[in-house]
Amino acid sequence: MSFNREYIVIVMNKHGVITIVYGYHPDTPVPEQVYTENLCYRFAIIFETAFPEYNTILFQSELFIELLSAIKTQVGGDSIQIESDEKKQYQSINLFKDDLLKLAEDERMPPRRIFLRKNNSLICFGETEFWALCGGPAPYSDSYTVSFYTKENMNEVFNAACSNVCSEMGAIIRERIQGLPYPEKPWWKKLFTVFSK
Amino acid sequence: MPSCRIPGPQGICEMIEVQPDSYQENEILIKGVSAGWAGWEISLRGRIALRLSGENFYFTGRPQPGMWVPPSGSTSKLFIYKASNPKKVFRLDYHGLESTSGRPAWHYNRTSGFAKIDGLKIADHAVTPGAAATGRALTIFRWGGRAMFVAGVAMSIYDVYHAENKAREITRQIGGWAGALTAGRYCASAGAKVGAGFMTAVGQLGPQIATPEELVTVPAGALIGGAIGGVGCGVVGWFAGTELTEIVYDWTFKQLEKEEWVVL
């Protein structure tokens, strides 16, 4: 299985490095909301965590906050809910940002889930994949990957938001990777689909 | 409650709950090591409790409850994580890196929470000879143990299939496996102590600080020593178990001698 990649030759930049993925990979953990809410289009931002000047895994918190704000504006949501863990929820990006920036830089972690709503309808669901805690396959290895799921293909909207923010902050987009258009089904579901036809 | 300390065996390890109050500084207590399946066990189903610089950690080979693991699993083969927070983790991982031009390499990853561990200054994504050596040893023992288990089961099935007295053979096999598991369990714990003690002694030949290599090699030595001890005693236990079972079976189901009478 091959994936299309656009490579940009870069030098590691202390302001941030991300990789963008359009679509799915076979190892992508697909959340239930994708199926229940029919949010089948995926746009993922891979935040690298290994920087030479730091000894520990590092979350690019400032870049994440700016990207999230830009995505909320571009996607057009009128309310946002951010879950940092099972007990803490925030109803605005600023509240989440205030709590996050109180922590030491090497203690910060991305939120678990993000709900973007418009007129009380879920238009975009975001979930963080904590590959930095378990390794994982390329291109996600040792990263914090925030995957956004939408009902319509909004790759251009997300792309524009990421490009603008990275340009303003001096961050680098290392690669843009085109993945699969749909999530990979487990073998038993494929078999069920075949026999049910 | 009985406990085992490194170096020097203190007796049989007991499966007990980790009690923070019972810990002492820089003590390695072997608990929860699921021994008996010696070669299989190097897949590290259990976890070892460590106390480093006054904090409690666990050392394990598999992701534990509280960690984020996708359905595809983790590429990490060793985890040292905080007992109070599984998300604070030091990992031995194997995959491609930027620094290796994408070639898979054994390397360390660490979150925050380890900087206060004496001597632990290893950087995130550090590729070291110690990481490579530990990773290769783990791979050999992991797959070797599974192969041994599968081969053992296959041999047992073969023996039962070709046996004249299947009931006797099944009983014999059960006795053999029971003996192997029991003997392997206790010898694995003893072997683990010897292995960790050996690694500790070797480590003492160098700098007197807990280098990243020692933090990994000492518990790894414990588990490898446990595997070797478990395999050896497992074999002995197998023969003892089969012999004993055969004797008991024959004694229980001994056929009566046929009596012949001559009518005078």
Image: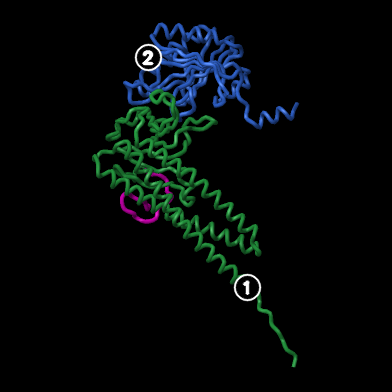
Please say if B254 is above or below A34.
below
- Helix, strand, or loop for circle 2? loop
Residue B254 bears which disc, if any?
1
Residue A19 point in image, percent of width and height: 46, 16
Please state, as top left, top right, bottom left or bottom right, where the C terminus of chain B lies in the image.
bottom right
C-alpha separation, residue under disc 1 versus residue under disc 2 = 82 Å
Residue A11 bears which disc, if any?
2
Q: Is residue B219 left or right of residue B155?
A: left
Q: Give the range drawn in magenta.
A: B1-19
Residue A161 point in image, percent of width and height: 48, 8
Q: In this view, does B81 lie to the left or right of A129?
A: left
Is residue B7 found inside the magenta-colored segment of the image? Answer: yes
Chain letter of the residue beneath label 2 in the structure image: A
Please identify which colour was used for chain B in the image.
green
Please say if B25 is above or below A169.
below
Do callouts 1 and 2 point to residues on the same chain? no
